[in-house]
Image (spheres, helix red, strand yellow):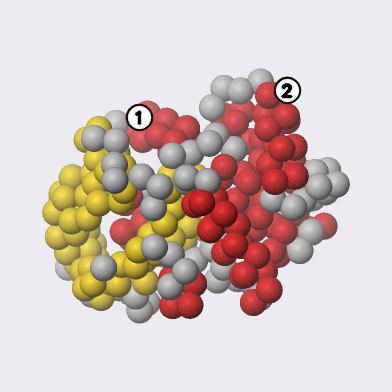
Amino acid sequence: MIPLLELTGVSKILGSEHILKDITLTINEGTFTSIIGPSGSGKSSLLYIMGLLDRPSSGEVRLCNEKIDFNNSNRLAEIRNRHYGFIFQFHYLIPELTLEENIMLPMIKAGKTLHEASEISHKLIDKFGLTGKANRKPYQVSGGEQQRVAIARAMANNPIVIFADEPTGNLDSKNTEIVMETFLHLNQEGKTIVMVTHELDLAKKTANILQMIDGRISSR
């Protein structure tokens, strides 16, 4: 397997609290990894550092063997927009925009034309079972459909890795199953996925499980 994301000796300290303690791990290309653990164990903090949304207090992060410089804000933004896809518990769609426009946003930021972004957006809308709903606003579709729009938006720039933080935490069991099947299908297509979840049943569907306790990886 090819290492995609590598963390070496990563720690995170806030005041006197050690959120993460000397984390060393490798995420290989094409894998589906779930991170589980009790509240406050550091799982979301770990995801945010891998996703370059937060910086470690110490240690090293490498993406495709490139050492990440957390002082280079322009490079961090470029990686997040062009190479990463993010999905959160709350979809964070812009309510004033249509579903199509929400999906187009990261592509416009990456420099695609309106025509290119619209064309890709429609393909993603069809791919994720939202055909005919491109011009609806987020409040005009269900919570499960909103989360599928969020997944489509995360896929817009064809990221090399997808980060999901409790992506089913706000969904009922039926929509949880639909979203999880969507992730599994994306992984079968070759996408690398890292998912934080408190649901062990979902974690068991992924190839790799990292168990976190008190800021450390206790098992894998």
Left or right: 143 as drawn, with respect to 43? right
Mark closer to the chain start, 1 or 2: 1
Residue at left 44%, top 53%?
Answer: 193
Q: Which amino acid does label 2 sit on?
A: His
Of 6 and 10, the residue lying toward us: 6
**Do the CB atoms of the residues marked 1 and 2 lie less than 8 Å apart?**
no
Residue at left 69%, top 64%?
Answer: 144
**Residue 75: mark:** 1
Give the number of the mark in front: 1 or 2. Answer: 2
Q: Where is 188 relative to 68, above or below?
A: below
Q: Where is 70 relative to 181, above or below?
A: above
Residue at left 43%, top 39%?
Answer: 160
Q: Mark 2 points at which residue?
A: 115
Q: What residue type is labelled 1?
A: Arg
Q: Residues within 10 Å of mark 1 (few under 14, many from 20)?
A: few
Q: How crowded is mark 2: few (under 14 residues within 10 Å), some or many (20 or more)?
A: few
- Marks 1 and 2, Cα distance to the nearest angstrom? 26 Å
